[in-house]
């Protein structure tokens, strides 16, 4: 993109609860698009619907974007030349445009009460407040100027509705979908302002702000496609048609199994998070799980989301944020929905885990180990990681994989005992203990291994039998890395103690 400094995009969430993972993807694509073009990324909070406002959601959105390193250039925390960036603080700004539309007869005042509208809908399920019905409703088109004035003086609530001209064809060139044609008759006369709230609705504020903030590209979820004709008509009505942004509607995120849109219920049902961070519902106290708390790395989530609806045109899968910025173009976004394959998120996390160096990972793990009640050193954790990192997807897997390095088994897995502990095991492991007692260097796993193997051969014992019983004694079950690596990590004293304990306990 050559007109780089003119690229201005916005992520415009409504603070109605925790940011859904689909919203995160929208933010990411806006960010990648902006950075790729050397443009500006804006965070605008669309909080004009007081009924749906949920305290804490704005802070949640900001924290989630920070965690994921989706950087905002202008917004609620950063400020900027086009602020304020919270719509509830822009009331005065919108007023002017409402007045302009009213003066130019492009909008009108409507006094129909919620009950009256309800009754209309009950009468006719297809009722739509539009060109076909507006003249039979209570509004400034049907009341006299004096009657309108009286109602206003009396403090009656009203709305301002946009007068939509019927049967106009509105054409939009969507950057992902190509040419999309709408008929204006599908739209009702949208409410632009509610006197009761003293606030414009989303419809007006969203459009006015796109213009005032000089938004060049509106990149948002497919669910907003139906609002596009209104966007176009309002830009026209306000005389801004020359500065219309370009639109790109991102494909839906689909259920991992079956058809339809990804929902929170799919996450609960299949046990994966649909939010970036944990969220505690301020009313019910219910906690919804987040990717961060589930042990995902932010880079893994970014990498995963980037490929849900966009592809690089080749079969590369691993991308850092910088590589994504470099490679990202809207043209490579797909029209069709992207299946939310959360197993792939685990796969990415595993990949990032392997790329992380052991000392950084150990630093992450130390507090987790401490929380289990064990003090240890970073060096020891690093040494364990050499052998078990490959089996880890999440940091918290460390404990499942490695607890026995910190706590001697006090029970032995019954199934493994039945299978692996033979009548001769106690005697053989006693001999093995004597041999290990004589060895003094516990830093060289291979050296210990060859001594033990030589003894097994000389005695014509069965290798598998001894090793399995040995593992059971040190680990408590049949898992773990190579036996002699375990021996070296535990050290001589601990190895012998565990061996003797098993011999006594299992007999
Ligand atoms: N406030 C809308 C939302 O919650 C923004 C839609 C748009 O990006 O235009 O997603």
Image (cartoon, rainbow, N blue to C red):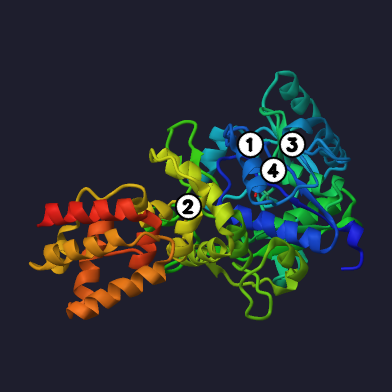
What is the x, y in percent for residue 10? 76, 51
- In the rendered structure, which disc, 3 or 2, sits on the residue that comes first in sequence? 3
Q: How far apart are marks 3 and 4 (CA)?
A: 12 Å
Task: Judge by depth and name the residue closer to the eye, 307 or 127.
Answer: 307
Single out the mark in the foreground, 3 or 4: 3
Single out the mark in the foreground, 2 or 4: 2
Q: How far apart are marks 2 and 1 (CA)?
A: 35 Å
Q: Are marks 3 and 1 in contact (CB under 8 Å)?
A: no
Single out the mark in the foreground, 4 or 1: 1
Residue in the image at 34% along x and 63% along y? 480
- As helix, strand or loop, the secondary structure at mark 2 comes to helix
- As helix, strand or loop, the secondary structure at mark 1 comes to helix
- In the rendered structure, which disc, 4 or 1, sits on the residue that comes first in sequence? 1
What is the x, y in percent for residue 313? 68, 79
The residue at label 4 has a CB less than 8 Å from ligand 1: yes
- As helix, strand or loop, the secondary structure at mark 3 comes to loop
Quadrant in the rendering for residue 175:
bottom right
Q: How far apart are marks 3 and 1 (CA)?
A: 12 Å
Residue corresponding to mark 3: 86
Q: Distance between the residues labelled 4 and 1?
A: 20 Å
- In the rendered structure, which disc, 3 or 1, sits on the residue that comes first in sequence? 1
Q: Are marks 2 and 4 in contact (CB under 8 Å)?
A: no
Residue corresponding to mark 2: 381
What is the x, y in percent for residue 145? 80, 29
Residue corresponding to mark 4: 202
- In the rendered structure, which disc, 2 or 1, sits on the residue that comes first in sequence? 1
Task: Judge by depth and name the residue closer to the eye, 62 or 245.
Answer: 62
Q: In this view, does 459 lie above or below 100?
A: below
Single out the mark in the foreground, 2 or 1: 2
């Amino acid at each position: 993109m050559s007109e780089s400094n003119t690229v201005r995009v916005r992520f415009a969430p409504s603070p109605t609860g925790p940011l859904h993972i689909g919203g995160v993807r929208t933010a990411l694509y806006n960010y990648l698009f902006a950075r790729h073009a050397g443009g500006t990324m804006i965070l605008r909070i669309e909080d004009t619907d007081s009924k749906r406002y949920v305290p804490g959601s704005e802070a949640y959105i900001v924290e989630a974007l920070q965690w994921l390193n989706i950087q905002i250039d202008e917004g609620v925390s950063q400020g900027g030349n086009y602020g304020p960036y919270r719509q509830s603080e822009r009331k005065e700004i919108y007023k002017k445009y409402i007045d302009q539309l009213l003066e130019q007869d492009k909008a009108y005042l409507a006094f129909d009460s919620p009950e009256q509208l309800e009754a209309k809908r009950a009468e006719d399920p297809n009722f739509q407040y539009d060109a076909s019905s507006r003249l039979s409703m209570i509004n400034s088109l049907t009341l006299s100027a004096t009657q309108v004035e009286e109602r206003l003086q009396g403090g009656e609530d009203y709305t301002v509705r946009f007068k939509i001209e019927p049967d106009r064809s509105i054409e939009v060139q969507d950057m992902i979908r190509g040419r999309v044609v709408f008929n204006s008759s599908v739209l009702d006369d949208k409410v632009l302002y509610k006197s009761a709230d003293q606030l414009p609705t989303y419809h007006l504020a969203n459009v006015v702000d796109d213009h005032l903030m000089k938004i060049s590209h509106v990149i948002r979820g497919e669910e907003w496609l139906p609002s596009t004709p209104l966007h176009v008509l309002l830009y026209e009505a306000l005389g801004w048609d020359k500065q219309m942004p370009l639109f790109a509607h991102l494909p839906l995120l689909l259920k991992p199994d079956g058809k339809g849109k990804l929902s929170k219920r799919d996450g609960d049902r299949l046990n994966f998070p649909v939010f970036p961070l944990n969220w505690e519902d301020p009313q019910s106290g219910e906690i919804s799980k987040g990717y961060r708390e589930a042990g995902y790395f932010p880079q893994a989530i970014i990498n995963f989301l980037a490929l849900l609806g966009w592809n690089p045109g080749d079969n590369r899968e691993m991308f850092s944020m910088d590589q994504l910025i470099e490679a990202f173009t809207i043209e490579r976004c797909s029209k069709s929905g992207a299946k939310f394959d959360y197993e792939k998120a685990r796969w990415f996390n595993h990949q990032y885990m392997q790329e992380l160096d052991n000392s950084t990972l150990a630093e992450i793990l130390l507090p987790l180990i401490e929380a289990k009640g064990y003090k240890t050193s970073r060096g020891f954790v690093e040494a364990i990681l050499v052998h078990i990192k490959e089996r880890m997807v999440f940091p918290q897997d460390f404990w499942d994989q490695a607890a026995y390095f910190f706590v001697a088994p006090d029970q032995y897995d019954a199934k493994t005992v039945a299978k692996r502990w033979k009548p001769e095991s106690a005697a053989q492991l006693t001999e093995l203990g004597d041999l290990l007692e004589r060895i003094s260097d516990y830093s060289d796993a291979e050296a210990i291994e060859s001594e033990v193997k030589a003894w097994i051969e000389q005695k014509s014992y069965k290798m598998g039998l001894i090793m399995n019983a040995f593992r059971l004694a040190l680990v408590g079950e049949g898992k773990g890395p190579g036996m002699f690596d375990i021996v070296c990590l535990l050290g001589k004293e601990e190895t012998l103690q565990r061996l003797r304990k098993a011999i006594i306990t299992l007999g």
